[in-house]
Amino acid sequence: MKHYRDQDFIERVGKRIVEIRKSKNISQEDLIERSGLSLSQIGRVERAEINTSISMIALIADCLGVLPSEVMDVEFEITPEYIPPLPPKEKRKK
């Protein structure tokens, strides 16, 4: 399995969490209490030290009162070049 890490995206997510949290006057301690995550987990996500899971992003977003898409702050433009073709039917996993 190939591992993929987009550090720029991870940093944008961390910064966005901080922006939203501060705009809503939510401290890290408040976020810890709401989410059940540890201070080190929250801090590492905000500082982009870990490539966090989608589940953790969803949990943090919920605790901040926003959608996960707001935390990820991304817009995708899907083009035919972006979508890889499917392998031939006989080579697909069953």
Image (cartoon, helix red, strand yellow):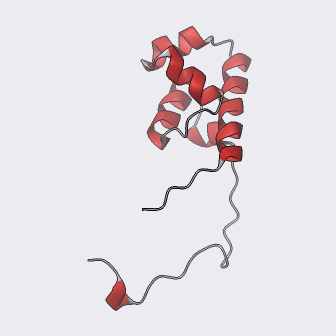
Q: In this view, does 64 lie to the left or right of 11?
A: left
Quarter assignment of residue 46: top right
Q: Where is residue 92 in the image (x, y as percent from the top left)?
A: 35, 81
Q: Which residue is drawn at 69% across and 49% down?
A: 74
Instruction: Determine the residue positioned at 30% across, 77% down.
Output: 93
| Rendering quarter of residue 4 | bottom right
Q: Quadrant of the C terminus?
A: bottom left
The relative height of residue 66 versus residue 94 in the rendered view (above or below) is: above
Depth check, front residue: 4 or 62? 4
53 lies above or below 94: above
Say if residue 70 shows up in the picture. Answer: no
Work out whether residue 4 or residue 57 is closer to the camera in this orientation and state it: 4
In percent of width and height, residue 25 lies at 69, 12
Does residue 38 sit above or below 52 in this rendering? above
Q: In which quarter of the image is the N terminus?
A: bottom left
User: Could you tell me which residue is drawn at 73 percent across and 25 percent down?
Assistant: 19
- Image spot of residue 48 (x, y percent): 64, 33
* 24 horizontally vs 38: left or right: right
Q: Which residue is drawn at 70% across and 64% down?
A: 77
The reply, left or right, for residue 15 in relation to residue 59 is right
